[in-house]
Image (spheres, rainbow, N blue to C red):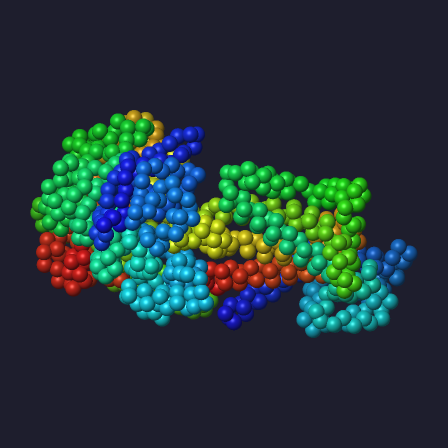
């Protein structure tokens, strides 16, 4: 087990390393000049060069990359546009000259929003998607099955920005049934926090739940005719109990894997949802930084998102191994 | 006293797509007395398993219509509310399923699954859990599994042990009736015997009546007081087992009993066969001819399909040395050089090997160790052993499909040990060595017509044009007892036996010098098995085939093969001419196997 975790951590580190390299390399290939952007439109050539030097952009690319990696592990000191030192502690994701703060702080400021949004959406996904899929499978061929299947098809085909604006218009502006979406810190009380996030949760959850509902339904249908489910019924268990205890267990593997990927993706930021509902999360930060050629923030957010995917995928593997004793961790 | 199980006019039909209805059981009646063992015998599609599920009330209510009456100890099951049937299940009537690996939950320990079977019906109370656990442990011990293993999962047990768990689970509440549906079919002969003995012992202890559902007359002969033969959903004949075995009234029963070769059948003789009871519309007319397939085979005098220069030129080189015709069977001394042989063969699988670690990796499995075998031209070598003995792996090495870890592999004097990794060598070899597989459902491409399936080897290896290939395919179909009209059909339109004939036709298309048949009849019903064995014997005589016949079934091997090699745990424990091995087995293991063969 310890060996497995160690191997897994090394694997994750390798993946993350490759991603930083790719993000770093790609950004340098782009036709823009971060020094010019950091310095501002009023700078003359000499000033830009000075900024370039203080930002370290005149160093060779490999040197900059190694500096970055060193900062990630041990922290480093970065010089601001004017040459003044900024202390950046490990894990240092660099310093944003656009936002004038370390990238990690920029992400940290926005992460509670993303965390709240993703967490709630995952709950919706599990309850709505997996619940609906399981119910539909158990009532296969009935009106309930058709209704749920149709509903999930809507979810799969509709776009978040359309659905988001539509429900916001109907439920907030037209009828006032739901308060205006927005982020209120959980520390200020769970009421306003949940109220502001209710719509984003439902919309983001619903759209992503569709895939889960369909997968759950097909997995359940496949598993419910397994011999061990029949054996359980042969013992005298009710059909429902046999399905909850045995069918669900058998169907869970791929769902957990997919849920791991989904969680990883959501915790890395949900740009469209954040934009539609005016939430300043990590997704919005990432896209803004790309638009503004804010190299350190781009690499930082990419790395941050990748970190969550890697962690949650590994977590999902552990859960699957826990659910099925035949699975060997290797 | 009321019988343990009483079935009256039971009819079960399944609703299919588009309103069609298939009747699986048609007006069946029988009674199972308390403490009795009744064998319910039939081939696939006879409806025998449906009877068991209907008695348990376990069919899918949305798709199934059940009428008639099933009384479990006097309580009606048919039409009873689910809650009433559930109260019977597991307490008064329990079931042992065929495939214990599939029938046990892979996610729960065997102890937990056993305890649950008891707990479901135990009266609610504080001590219920503890009591169920105790009961489970005691039951495990009773079926010969140490209680300490209750915490293990099904996949950690052998097939026989898993079936013991199933039996323990069925008997934990001492039911009136146990329905055992093919309880030993997936097991090796020796384990099968142990399980049947255990079942008999437990039955005597508990007085539970057993309905033993099986296709295997041998199993019934050894265990059942009475037997009921089913065919096409109907009860055909019922009576004391001994009487039916020796003096059955119905010809089908007689044929069913005689169709499987036993250790007393005269080797090489034609086995009695029965007509296919269910003739599917598509393959319909052919069934008529199947029984007499042997007689209808034309003399195969045609030469090998000619190869155009260049096209299959290399293939020819392989068999330059022994251009002489294979020696006729049974005449003259054995040729100096064997057609195919393996010497000191080792094969190992898997294992985790470090990046810089050489040699055998951790956890590697030695599938074959130190095996030496030879197949002479015109002879049939039977490779026999239990599952996991390495017989299939050895066959795959000879077919050039598996890379040996070490050892020599030769076909016609040529080293073919690298064929598995060498596409060209493998291709050349495939001209002379062809395979017939176990599962005729899995081994034929469902999207290809019979013509495409049979002519593919010709297309790959010969320069014959489409018309010539078709003519050859038609000739082959005739040879295996099918008809030219079948060329344009797809595999799903044929029965299992017919599919196996198609597989044989494909294997023979190139007139190979060696045919490797891996369990070619073990997926077939006994009567169909007899037909295919008859066909193979006819073709062998007619074409002078050399065969490697891999099988777990000693009776079939004895019937079909000239020489026999017995494998166990990767090694050959005994080999020699058929009569020597069967009449005077040297290895204790061979004797054990023979004793377990029913």
Nearest to the observer: residue B38 or residue A99: B38
| B467 to the left or right of B129 | left
| A105 to the left or right of B365 | right
| x and y, in percent, of residue A87 in the image | 79, 72
Q: Residue at x 33, y 53 (%)?
A: B92
Q: Residue at x 58, y 41 (%)?
A: A148
Does the rendering let one see residue B415? Answer: no
Nearest to the observer: residue B533 or residue A109: A109
| A109 to the left or right of B414 | right
- State whether residue A12 is above or below residue A266: below
| x and y, in percent, of residue A100 in the image | 83, 63
- State whether residue B354 is above or below residue A254: below
Q: Quadrant of residue B141?
A: bottom left
Nearest to the observer: residue A97 or residue A159: A159
Q: Residue at x 75, y 58 (%)?
A: A191
| x and y, in percent, of residue A325 in the image | 45, 62
Does the rendering let one see residue A115? Answer: yes
| x and y, in percent, of residue A154 in the image | 63, 40
- Counting every numbered tag in the picture gives 0
């Amino acid at each position: 087990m310890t060996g497995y975790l160690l191997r897994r951590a090394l694997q994750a580190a390798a993946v993350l390393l490759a991603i930083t390299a790719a993000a770093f390399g790609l950004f340098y290939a782009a036709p823009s000049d971060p020094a010019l952007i950091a310095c501002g439109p009023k700078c003359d050539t000499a000033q830009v060069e000075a900024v370039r030097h203080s930002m370290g952009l005149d160093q060779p690319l490999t040197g900059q990359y190694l500096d970055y990696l060193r900062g990630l592990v041990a922290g480093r000191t970065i010089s601001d546009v004017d040459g003044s030192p900024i202390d950046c502690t490990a894990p240092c994701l660099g310093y944003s000259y656009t936002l004038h703060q370390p990238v990690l702080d920029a992400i940290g400021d926005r992460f509670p929003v993303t965390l709240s949004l993703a967490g709630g959406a995952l709950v919706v996904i599990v309850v709505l998607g997996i619940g609906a899929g399981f119910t539909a499978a158990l009532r296969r061929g009935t009106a309930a099955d058709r209704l749920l299947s149709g509903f999930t098809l809507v979810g799969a085909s509709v776009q978040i920005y359309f659905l988001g604006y539509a429900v916001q218009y109907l439920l907030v502006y037209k009828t006032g049934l739901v308060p205006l979406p927005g982020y209120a810190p959980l520390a200020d009380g769970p009421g306003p926090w949940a109220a502001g996030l209710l719509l984003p949760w439902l919309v983001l959850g619903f759209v992503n739940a569709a895939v889960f509902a369909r997968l759950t339904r097909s997995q359940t249908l496949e598993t419910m005719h397994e011999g061990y489910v029949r054996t359980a019924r042969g013992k005298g268990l009710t059909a429902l109990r046999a399905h909850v205890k045995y069918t669900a267990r058998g169907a869970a593997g791929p769902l957990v894997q997919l849920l791991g990927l989904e969680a990883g993706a959501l915790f890395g930021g949900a740009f469209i949802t954040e934009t539609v509902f005016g939430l300043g999360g990590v997704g919005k930060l990432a896209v803004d930084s790309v638009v503004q050629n804010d190299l350190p923030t781009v690499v930082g957010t990419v790395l941050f998102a990748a970190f969550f995917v890697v962690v949650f995928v590994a977590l999902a593997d552990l859960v699957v191994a826990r659910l099925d004793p035949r699975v060997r961790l290797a | 006293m009321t019988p343990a199980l009483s079935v009256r006019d039971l009819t079960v039909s399944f609703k299919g797509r588009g309103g069609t209805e298939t009747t699986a059981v048609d007006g069946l009646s029988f009674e199972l007395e308390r403490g009795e063992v009744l064998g319910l015998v039939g081939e696939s599609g006879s409806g025998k398993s449906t009877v068991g599920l209907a008695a348990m009330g376990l069919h899918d209510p949305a798709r199934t219509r059940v009428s008639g009456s099933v009384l479990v100890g006097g309580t009606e099951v048919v039409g009873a509310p689910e809650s009433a049937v559930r109260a019977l299940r597991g307490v008064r009537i329990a079931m042992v399923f065929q495939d214990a690996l599939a029938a046990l939950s892979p996610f729960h320990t065997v102890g937990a699954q056993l305890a649950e079977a008891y707990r479901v019906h135990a009266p609610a109370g504080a001590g219920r859990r503890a009591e169920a656990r105790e009961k489970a442990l005691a039951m495990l011990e009773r079926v010969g599994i140490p209680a300490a293993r209750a915490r293990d999962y099904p996949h950690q047990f052998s097939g026989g042990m898993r079936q013991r768990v199933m039996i323990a689970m069925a008997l934990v509440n001492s039911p009136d009736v146990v329905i055992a549906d093919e309880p030993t079919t997936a097991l090796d002969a020796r384990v099968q015997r142990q399980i049947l003995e255990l079942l008999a012992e437990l039955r005597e202890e508990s007085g539970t009546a057993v309905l033993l559902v099986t296709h295997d007359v041998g199993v019934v002969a050894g265990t059942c007081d009475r037997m009921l033969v089913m065919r096409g959903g109907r009860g055909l004949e019922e009576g004391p087992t001994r009487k039916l075995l020796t003096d059955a009234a119905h010809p089908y029963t007689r044929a069913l009993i005689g169709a499987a070769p036993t250790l007393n059948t005269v080797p090489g003789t034609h086995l009695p066969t029965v007509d296919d009871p269910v003739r599917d519309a598509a393959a319909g007319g052919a069934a008529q001819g199947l029984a007499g397939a042997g007689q209808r085979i034309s003399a195969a005098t045609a030469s090998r399909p000619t190869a155009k220069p260049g096209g299959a030129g290399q293939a020819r080189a392989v068999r330059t040395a022994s251009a002489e015709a294979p020696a006729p069977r049974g005449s003259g001394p054995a040729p100096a050089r064997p057609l195919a042989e393996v010497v000191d063969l080792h094969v190992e699988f898997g294992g985790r090997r470090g990046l810089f670690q050489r040699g055998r990796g951790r956890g590697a499995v030695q599938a074959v160790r130190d095996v030496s075998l030879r197949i002479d031209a015109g002879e049939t070598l039977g490779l026999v052993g239990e599952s996991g003995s390495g017989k299939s792996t050895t066959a795959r090495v000879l077919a050039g499909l598996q890379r040996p870890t070490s050892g020599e592999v030769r076909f016609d004097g040529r080293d073919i040990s690298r064929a598995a990794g060498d596409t060209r060598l493998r291709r050349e070899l495939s001209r002379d060595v062809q395979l017939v597989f176990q599962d005729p459902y899995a081994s034929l491409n469902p999207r290809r017509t019979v013509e495409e399936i049979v002519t593919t080897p010709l297309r790959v290896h010969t320069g014959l044009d489409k018309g010539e290939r078709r003519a050859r395919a038609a000739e082959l179909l005739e040879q295996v007892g099918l008809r030219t009209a079948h060329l344009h059909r797809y595999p799903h339109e044929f029965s299992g036996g017919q599919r196996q004939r198609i597989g044989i036709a494909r294997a023979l298309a190139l007139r190979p010098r060696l045919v490797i048949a891996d369990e070619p009849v073990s997926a077939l019903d006994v009567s169909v098995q007899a037909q295919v064995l008859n066909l193979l014997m006819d073709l062998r005589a007619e074409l002078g085939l050399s065969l490697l016949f891999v099988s777990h079934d000693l009776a079939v091997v004895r019937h079909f093969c000239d020489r026999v090699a017995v494998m166990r745990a990767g090694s050959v424990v005994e080999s020699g001419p058929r009569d020597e091995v069967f009449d005077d087995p040297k290895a204790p293991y061979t004797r054990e196997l023979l004793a377990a063969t029913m």
